[in-house]
């Protein structure tokens, strides 16, 4: 079983993000994610939205895979941006913000362990613990670059919205 290094609580207040939404199965998303992230980074670079000290990259899971059919699943590649920047949406890139209270599982995981990390956060921690889920989107925040092969690991934070 994959377990987090630790679990903390974090409150986000209007964290600005830009994102590109994908519709399809998680497998299809993984096949297209590099292209989507490249498009997002190109937009952010052109519009001077990257702050190397503050910008974080994330994947947002807009739908529950146990409820939504795989063809209709919405998954978004995203990045945080400074709040003092004007964003003009263009092409596939949209602008939004994230707010609220989150439980954050801090993981050091390999590519094949992401599913188990999510399962731990929901099945072992949230459903068996005292926290109550909140109706908002969960997401992964990449502290270090995600692994490019099955042997490497990376630091990834999983944010679960709670009340």
Image (cartoon, grey):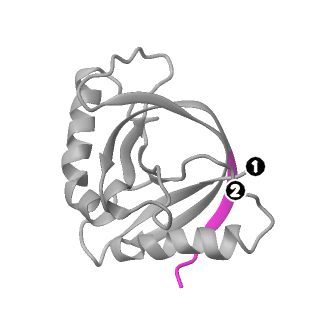
Disc 2 element? loop
* Residue 16 rendering spot, x and y as whole percentages: 50, 29
Q: Residue at x 21, y 54 (%)?
A: 32
> Could you say which is closer to the camera, residue 151 or residue 71?
71
| Quarter of the view holding residue 153 | bottom left
Whether residue 127 appears in magenta in the rendering, the answer is no
Dots 1 and 2: beta carbons under 8 Å?
yes
Give the Cα distance between marks 1 and 2.
Answer: 6 Å
Task: Return the residue found at the far bottom.
Answer: 1
Q: Residue at x 77, y 61 (%)?
A: 131
Assess disc 2: are there few (<14), some (14-19) or many (≥20) residues with their C-alpha within 10 Å of its C-alpha: some
Label at residue 78: none
Q: Is residue 98 left or right of residue 43?
A: right
Tag 1 secondary structure? loop
Q: Is residue 140 visible?
A: yes
Residue span colored magenta = 1-10
The residue positioned 43% from the left and 70% from the top of the image is 114
Q: Look at mark 1 in the image and give the residue it sits on.
A: 163
* Residue carrying label 2: 133
Q: Is residue 77 above or below residue 86?
A: below
Whichever of callouts 1 and 2 sits on the residue coming sooner in the sequence is: 2
* Number of residue marks: 2
Please name the residue shown 35% across and 25% down the image. Answer: 49
Q: Position of residue 133 (x, y in %)?
A: 70, 56
Q: Is residue 5 visible?
A: no
Of 150 and 33, which appears nearest the observer? 33
Rendering quarter of residue 132? bottom right
């Amino acid at each position: 079983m994959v377990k987090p290094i630790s679990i903390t609580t974090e409150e986000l207040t209007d964290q600005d993000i830009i994102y590109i939404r994908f519709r399809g199965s998680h497998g299809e998303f993984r096949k297209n994610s590099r292209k989507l992230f490249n498009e997002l980074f190109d937009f952010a670079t052109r519009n001077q939205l990257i702050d190397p000290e503050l910008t974080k990259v994330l994947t947002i899971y807009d739908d529950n895979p146990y409820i939504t059919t795989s063809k209709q699943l919405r998954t978004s590649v995203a990045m945080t941006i400074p709040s003092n920047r004007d964003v003009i949406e263009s092409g596939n890139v949209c602008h939004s913000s994230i707010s609220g209270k989150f439980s954050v599982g801090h993981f050091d995981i390999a590519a094949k362990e992401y599913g188990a990390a999510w399962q731990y956060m929901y099945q072992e921690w949230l459903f068996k613990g005292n926290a109550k889920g909140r109706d908002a989107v969960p997401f992964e925040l990449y502290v270090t670059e995600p692994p490019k092969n099955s042997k490497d690991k990376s630091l990834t934070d999983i944010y679960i919205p709670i009340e």
